[in-house]
C-alpha cells in the first residue's frame, strides 16, 4: 500500500499533471467569462438586430404540454433549436478567444536565439607555415654539421 501511495504521489506531483490541473481550472473560469460575454453582451445586440428575439427561447413544438391548473399532466415535447444556436455562438466565441490568446502568447514568446558558435582559432597562414618549415630545416642542417 505504501508503494502504491508513493507512486501516486510521484504521479500527481509531476509537472505535467499539475500544469494540466491549472489549465482545467483556468479553462473553466475562462468558459464562464466567455459565456457571460455571449449571454450578456453579444446576444442582446443580436437580439436587437433580429427584432428583440431571444435565441434561447426559439423552439419547435412537437407535442404541446397538457396542464390542469398549475399541475403539468404531460410535459411539452419540443426541439429547442434556439438553445443550440446559443451554444454554437458560445463555441465560436470561445474558439476565437483561444485563437487570439494563443496567437498573442506565441508572439510574446520569442524563439530562443541560437548561441553564436565560438570561432575556431585562426590557424597559421601559409607564409607562417613555410617560414616555420624553413627554420626547422635550417636548425636540422646546423645540427648535422
Image (cartoon, grey):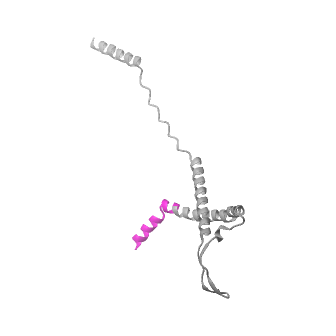
Q: Residue furthest left?
A: 144
**What x and y, as percent, mark residue 128?**
41, 18
**Where's the N terminus, which quadrant?**
bottom left
Q: Quadrant of the C terminus?
A: top left
Left or right relative to 12: residue 69: right
Of the pair 41 and 64, the residue shown nearer to us: 64
Q: Main secondary structure of the magenta part?
A: helix
| Residue 49 position in % (x across, y down) | 71, 61
Instruction: Write the residue at 58% across / 54% down.
Output: 99
Residue 125 to residue 19: above or below: above
Q: Is residue 130 left or right of residue 58?
A: left
Q: Is residue 38 above or below residue 59?
A: above
* Viewer-closest of 52 and 124: 52
Compared with 76, 41 (above or below) is: above
Judged from this view, the residue extending furthest toward the top is 145
Write the residue at 52% across / 44% down: 112
x and y, in percent, of residue 92 in the image: 59, 59
At which x and y percent is residue 113? 52, 41
Q: Is residue 69 left or right of residue 81?
A: right
Location of residue 28 (image quadrant): bottom right
Q: Which residues are magenta?
A: 1-19
Viewer-proximal residue among 7 and 100? 100
Q: Nearer the viewer, residue 143 or 51?
A: 51
Verify whether residue 70 appears in magenta: no
Amino acid at each position: 500500500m505504501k508503494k502504491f501511495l508513493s507512486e501516486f504521489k510521484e504521479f500527481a506531483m509531476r509537472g505535467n499533471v499539475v500544469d494540466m490541473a491549472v489549465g482545467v481550472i483556468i479553462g473553466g473560469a475562462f468558459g464562464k467569462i466567455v459565456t457571460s460575454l455571449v449571454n450578456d453582451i453579444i446576444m442582446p445586440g443580436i437580439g436587437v438586430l433580429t427584432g428583440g428575439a431571444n435565441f434561447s427561447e426559439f423552439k419547435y413544438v412537437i407535442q404541446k404540454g397538457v396542464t390542469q391548473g398549475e399541475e403539468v399532466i404531460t410535459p411539452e415535447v419540443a426541439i429547442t433549436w434556439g438553445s443550440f444556436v446559443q451554444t454554437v455562438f458560445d463555441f465560436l466565441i470561445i474558439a476565437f478567444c483561444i485563437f487570439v490568446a494563443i496567437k498573442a502568447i506565441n508572439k510574446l514568446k520569442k524563439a530562443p536565439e541560437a548561441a553564436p558558435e565560438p570561432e575556431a582559432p585562426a590557424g597559421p597562414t601559409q607564409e607562417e607555415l613555410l617560414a616555420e618549415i624553413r627554420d626547422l630545416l635550417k636548425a636540422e642542417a646546423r645540427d648535422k654539421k
